[in-house]
Image (cartoon, rainbow, N blue to C red):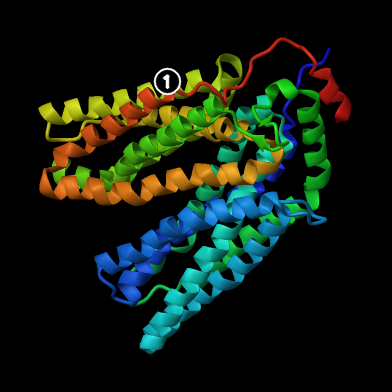
Amino acid sequence: MEKLKLDTRRTILIGFAFLSICSFWQMYNSVIPLILTNTFHLNETWSGVIMAADNILALFLLPLFGGLSDRCKARLGRRKPFVLAGTIAAVVLMLALPFLDDSYFTAAATWKLAAFIGVLGCLLVAMGTYRSPAVALMPDVTPKPLRSKANAIINLMGAVGGILYLIIASVLYSSARTAGMAHVSYVMLFCVVAGIMLLALAVLMTTVDEPKLSARAQAYEAAHPEENLVVTDENGKETLPPEVKKSLGFLLASIALWFIGYNAIETWFTTYANHMWGMALGDASICLTIATVGAILSYIPAGALASRFGRKKTILGGVALLTGCFFAAFIYTCFSHSFHPGLYLLFALVGVAWASINVNSLPMVVEMCKGSEVGKFTGYYYTFSMAAQTVTPIVAGALLSRVGYTTLFPYAAAFVGCAFVTMLFVKHGDNQVKPKTGLDAYEDLN
């Protein structure tokens, strides 16, 4: 009897959609604030409002288009039409931005600023139309026991997209190339990222047969009804039992709580390090980079741990480690007012903890739905994570300004610690670690 195996090559190909998304957002978050402040001369408040628009739009767009893709019956499949249309629309819109930027610098006009913001808004909508469908494609075609391992690969592909952008930006826009320039044109950068997005789209569209793969996954699900948490009521309507809904509620609350804590550090750490330890931006950014590298190196092991010990235990371990790291950083600041290189190890552990949480949380959410609702439940995941990332910069920032910078790490530790408590009440959505029973049925479908 053969063991159920993850098709790593296929998962990598599916991950090209997420690579494209992450490459875009890495550029967006890096370049758009510079354009708003340097070219259009908007102050930090208005720039911040515009930059927060993507999170606010995501609260509505991600669950909406995730649910719409569930009901799509196109020949290409349920998800690929959204990825195709959304990527092409995004590429067309994003290529207009650097030209508007250059044009405004050459001859400033109010209508050009209005056009830039209008195009930016349309671009955010275009990106919002296909993020949930792109992410839902992985659980669509992957059997439930293998989704943590598959999500680890998807996250790794996203990291590759972000790193690819950083390498390109560092080469094209090094200090030596831009020194002394009155205005930096980003046309080349936008074109290269657009090329990456189109290339990733081409790989996905030509190598992933979504209808065929989805049919195989549905056949596996039908052959293993014991893994399906959805029940049929007396009226023939499929629904989640009350106890499963309760687990889902606690899981979504946990997701919001740990994002509130983690994103507070992501947003405010460089400011904190400058204020508390006198660190320059570049030096403080090294800490966050080390955390990112720690996460990247831990994605695959985190998926493997979940397959062996269960997703919930792996997440709880990650949450406990993350809480401990943030609390340890707070204790350090109580006794020292300067940065110590030993903190690099602490941030590496932060990355390990975050990978353990992030790789396994989405698979737990979609484990609680039937295959036809993966997009909607993916939207639920993003609604709660995005809501947290919208609120926490404001709340944490208010604490820093009104109470003091020493509140940052206790704030993060408290919310992540609360996530540990709520996760204890999650009783469903874990992968079932089983002996080799009945899995050969799926192997026969390959």
The residue furthest top is 435
Q: Residue at x 56, y 30 (%)?
A: 364
Closer to the camera, 119 or 235?
A: 235
Q: Quadrant of residue 431?
A: top right
Q: Position of residue 86 (x, y in %)?
A: 63, 62
Outermost residue toward the right? 444
| Residue at the spot of label 1 | 424
Q: Which amino acid, mark 1?
A: Leu
| Among the 4 quarters of the image, the one containing residue 258 | top left
Few, some or many residues within 10 Å of mark 1 (<14, 14–19, 20+):
some
Foreground of the two, 124 or 277: 124
Can you give x and y, in whole percent of width and height, for residue 263 in the image? Answer: 35, 43
Q: Is residue 306 left or right of residue 387?
A: right
The residue that appears at 55% across and 60% down in the rendered structure is 127
Q: Is residue 309 above or below residue 64?
A: above
- Left or right side of 298 for 260: left
Examine the rendering and report whether any part of residue 290 can be seen.
Answer: no
